[in-house]
Amino acid sequence: MFIILGIAILSALAYTVFSTFFQSKIIILKKDGFVNLNVDIAGTDKEKIEGLSNRKYIPENYGMLFIFDKEDYPEMWMRNTLISLDMIFISSNFRIVDIKHAYPCKKDPCEIYKPGMRSKYVLEVNGNLTIKKDINIGDRINIYLT
């Protein structure tokens, strides 16, 4: 009886986590192809503050898209982030304008990652994914909100 109840609870938790885990899609259009990503959206202040913190793992083709009200120089940090990330800064016309390789913050004050050009979106993905998939400044982004 307890085993069945445990399985039911775990199934409900897995459904809750994974039902929002892949809520939107992004396609990065490169010179020689494309990269498909499933993303969570960080639109609220709370979601932006939490970001990908406290996660020990994210799937390779997964990311989190931060959406800002206006194009500016968003400042990102890695407080309580356990894994290395690539931060892809995206302009309001959906072009990659900067890429930063970010590492977990070991002590305060945490390093601040900021683009060299104005950005409206920041896409966080696994560390070095931009190198592995040859994602570069100037590549175009298509966002499919679901």
Image (tube, rainbow, N blue to C red):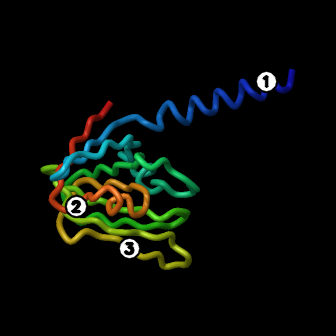
- Asked if the residue at tag 1 contacts the one at tag 2, i.e. Cβ–Cβ closer than 8 Å, the answer is no
Which amino acid type is marked by label 2?
Asn
Disc on res. 136: 2
Mark pair 2, 1: CA separation: 48 Å
Give the residue furthest to the right.
1
Disc 3 residue crowd, few under 14, some 14–19, many 20+, Cα 10 Å = few
**Mark 3 or mark 1: whose residue is earlier in sequence:** 1
Mark whose residue sits in front, 3 or 1: 1
- Relative to the observer, which residue lies in front, 109 or 128? 128
Task: Tell me: 85 left or right of 142.
Answer: right
Q: Which amino acid is tagged 1?
A: Leu
User: Which dot marks residue 112?
Assistant: 3
| Mark nearer the viewer, 2 or 3 | 2
Residue corresponding to mark 1: 5
Local secondary structure at mark 2:
loop
What's the CA distance linking mark 2 and mark 3? 21 Å
In the image, residue 110 lies at what x, y percent?
47, 75
Give how far across and how far down residue 63 sits, in percent: 40, 49
Residue appearing at x 12%, y 50% in the figure = 93
